Amino acid sequence: MIYIVGAGPGDLGLLTLRGYEVLKRADIVIYDNLVGEGILSIIPEAAEKLDAGKSAGHHKMKQSEIEAALIKLSSSGKNIVRLKGGDPFLFGRGGEEAEALIREGIKFEIVPGVCSALSVPAYAGIPATHRDYSSGVKIFTAHDKNNLIPSSDSSTSIFLMGVANSEALQNELLKTMKPLTPCSIIENGTKSSQRVVRTTLAELHASIVRENIVPPAVIVAGGTAELNLDWRSNLPLAGKKIIVTRPEIRAGKLSSMLRDLGAEVVLMPTIKTRTIHGAIDGANLTGYDWIGFTSVTGVEALMELLNETGRDVRELGSAKIAAIGQATKDALNSHCLKVDYVPEVFDGVHLAEGLAKSGGKILMFRAENGTPEIQNTFINYGIIAEQICIYRTDYVKLSHVPKFADIIIFTSSSTVRGFAENSNLLRDSFAVCIGKQTADEALRAGFNNIRIAEQATISDIVHACVSINS
């Protein structure tokens, strides 16, 4: 099946639910330049990615080649997503691609996208219409220089792709519009790098040259362009691009909190975890005084292993249960397991210290390739704790790494190591780390600007990000 999907203006939060659904099950994705990095980052790891980006004077794939590729791939039996910035039927040439598929009798679905002509001005605090300024809106592509003469009525005129032709655009508009007509140019709308330049029609081209405006940019001409109903700049993380490196399945709450505070979030999971099947086969889980869990993943892996072998949590007997932190405690509570001990500092060293001081027979469920600090701490206290490795962490090979980020969030030492496997870039970014062990790993990886969350919680990670911007 072929899906022609509008990705919206760039911000991941403006991708539609339907767009997200079809993108997450894509086998092949053909994407454009205007698709935001946050959206590119959620393309499935296994999907084949074809860059069809177009810029002035340079097309990686010609339009005819894109259409031919869609036709050829349609017989593959795979899910094909043609991912386009904005809405595919508004200056996105989606209509031409749909016509090509119809001529060949190929089934497809159009997934509308949030239109950049309206959403980008909205993110800049500029309404397309306002009862005191504008009673309508007209949308143009500035690539068509022969049809750029909107009437001088009370409508707002919005131009896409107008930077390269701004001088010709200005000259055409001056034929019917007053020189002092308010204009706004919005560069990289909805993204962390969004920039707004307010000017007049007489100064439009000069302003673009003086401010070095580059595509993508939206130009608004008309009375509403002088309005500044700004709502983003007061958000504490406005203008910040933040990379979240934890597995996508764990990143939802953190990403939402960051977006609520104005950040542009790019999901860049550097690790993935998988349960080690057979890890508890033949293992006797009874007779322990303490059973410790070092992560939410460990809790879920144990429940999966118990379920697939027809066993249940009653095998843990009367053992007390220890969790490394609040999130792990919550995960255990969700399985009706009461947690008896959580260290004041949410990390493996303090968890091991607390258990060692309590004494008794200890069993730890943990990752196969986890950090050695826990076991070393037990050894330092003269304690031999038994360990069962029930999951392992693998590094993810990323196909797309942003060239810039203000902040990179690391929620474990393994996310740092996974990042180091993928990129030597971005070391000048702030590394916000969930705890000291993770921060030490970030330092070894070459980060110089490091902040540590006060507690190993999602809220404290967000607070650490905000503190950088304050």
Image (spheres, rainbow, N blue to C red):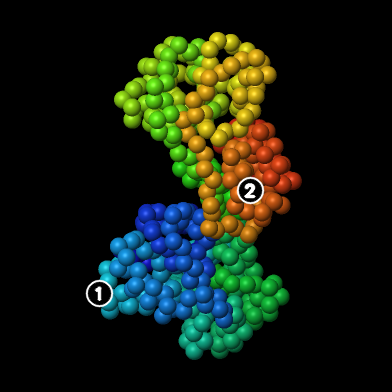
Compared to residue 274, the image places residue 40 above or below, namely: below
Q: Quadrant of the N terminus?
A: bottom left
Residue 22 occupies quadrant: bottom left
Q: Quadrant of the C terminus?
A: top right
> What kind of residue is marked 1?
Gly
> What kind of residue is marked 2?
Ala
The numbered disc on residue 105 is 1
**Which residue is at the front of the view, 114 or 176?**
114
Residue at 68 percent of width and 42 percent of height: 442
Would residue 223 be seen by someone viewing this image from the given angle? no
- The answer for how far apart the CA atoms under marks 2 and 1 are is 47 Å
Q: Residues within 10 Å of mark 2 (few under 14, many from 20)?
A: some
Mark 2 vs mark 1: give the one in front: 2
Residue at 52 percent of width and 43 percent of height: 394
Q: Circle 1 — which element?
A: loop
**Which residue is at the front of the view, 26 or 311?**
311
**Which residue is at the front of the view, 218 or 411?**
411
Residue at 71 percent of width and 52 percent of height: 428
Q: Tell me residue 364's x, y (percent).
A: 52, 22
Would residue 14 be seen by someone viewing this image from the given angle? yes
Q: Residue furthest right?
A: 448
Q: Residue furthest front?
A: 282
Q: Tell me residue 268's x, y (percent).
A: 54, 50
Compared to residue 141, the image places residue 349 above or below, namely: above
Residue at 74 percent of width and 46 percent of height: 448
Q: Tell me residue 254's x, y (percent).
A: 53, 42
Residue topped by disc 2: 420
Labels 2 and 1 touching (C-beta < 8 A): no
Precedes in sequence: disc 2 or disc 1: 1
Compared to residue 302, the image places residue 433 above or below, namely: below
